[in-house]
């Protein structure tokens, strides 16, 4: 193809190419902003930790409402744990209830706020997610729970705590 037989100028095609380039730039900028916003706010890159934080929120809400069976199901990541209680005989519901009432590390839980989470361990997103919550509005009463990414089970105490 030479200049003498070049294709005719198509303004519609040029406008489409321009819109695609602008749209791609906006999408990339939005992705960068969301990535950094999630990290800075303490909810993981691209807010990837939000689902686990929501599970911790439901867990603490069940503890507040004295629904220990529901909280235990979240803790062991098995909604139907009551159909196979022998599977959890190493840490039964009775002991779980005592741990979160009589021996609670933060006392009775009347209110909570899930503050922040960080990844811990090896790999891109870590093997454990450490979730921090403020209990009863007291900044000195912070609860740290570990959530295993592999099976979704909770662990208390968390492997370690973090400052924020």
Image: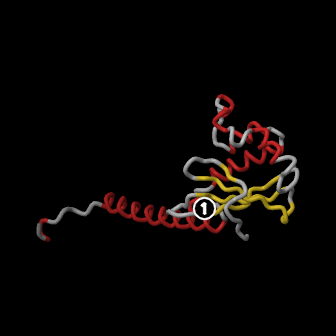
State the image quarter where residue 63 is shown.
top right
Q: Position of residue 59 (x, y in %)?
A: 73, 46
Q: Residue furthest top?
A: 83
**Place of residue 96 in the rendered image (x, y in percent of width and height, measured from the top left):** 77, 43
Q: Give left or right: position of 156 versus 20.
A: right
Foreground residue among 67 and 53 = 67
Please say if 70 is above or below 32: above
Front in this rendered view, residue 133 or 94: 94
Q: Colour scheme in the image?
A: secondary structure
Residue occupied by mark 1: 44
Which residue is nearer to you in this view: 63 or 86? 86
Residue at the spot 47% in from the left edge and 65% down from the top edge: 28
- Determine whether, in the image, residue 5 is placed left or right of residue 154: left
Q: Is residue 47 above or below residue 151?
A: below
Locate the N terminus by quadrant: bottom left
- Using a 10 Å C-alpha cutoff, classify the residue at mark 1 as few (fewer than 14 neighbours), some (14 to 19) or many (20 or more): many
Q: Which quarter of the rendered picture does the C terminus lie within? A: bottom right
Question: Residue 32 location in percent, x, y?
Answer: 52, 67
Residue reaching furthest to the front: 90
Residue 40 quadrant: bottom right
- Residue 116 picture location, percent across and down: 70, 61
Label 1 residue SS: loop
Nearest the camera: 1 or 51?
51
Above or below: residue 148 compared with residue 141: above
Q: How many marks?
A: 1
- What's the residue at 69%, 65% (across, down)? 160
Residue 68 drawn above or below residue 40: above
């Amino acid at each position: 193809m030479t200049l003498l037989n070049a294709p005719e100028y198509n303004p519609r095609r040029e406008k489409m190419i321009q819109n695609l380039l602008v749209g791609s730039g906006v999408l990339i900028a939005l992705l960068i902003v969301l990535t950094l916003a999630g990290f800075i706010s303490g909810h993981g890159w691209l807010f990837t930790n939000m689902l686990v934080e929501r599970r911790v929120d439901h867990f603490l809400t069940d503890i507040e409402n004295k629904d220990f069976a529901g909280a235990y199901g979240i803790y062991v990541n098995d909604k139907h744990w009551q159909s196979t209680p022998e599977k959890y005989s190493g840490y039964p519901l009775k002991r779980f209830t005592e741990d979160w009432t009589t021996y609670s590390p933060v006392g009775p839980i009347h209110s909570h706020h899930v503050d922040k989470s960080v990844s811990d361990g090896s790999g891109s997103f870590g093997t454990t997610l450490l979730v921090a919550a403020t209990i009863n509005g007291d900044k000195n009463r912070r609860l740290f729970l570990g959530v295993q990414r592999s099976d979704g089970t909770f662990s208390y105490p968390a492997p370690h705590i973090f400052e924020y």
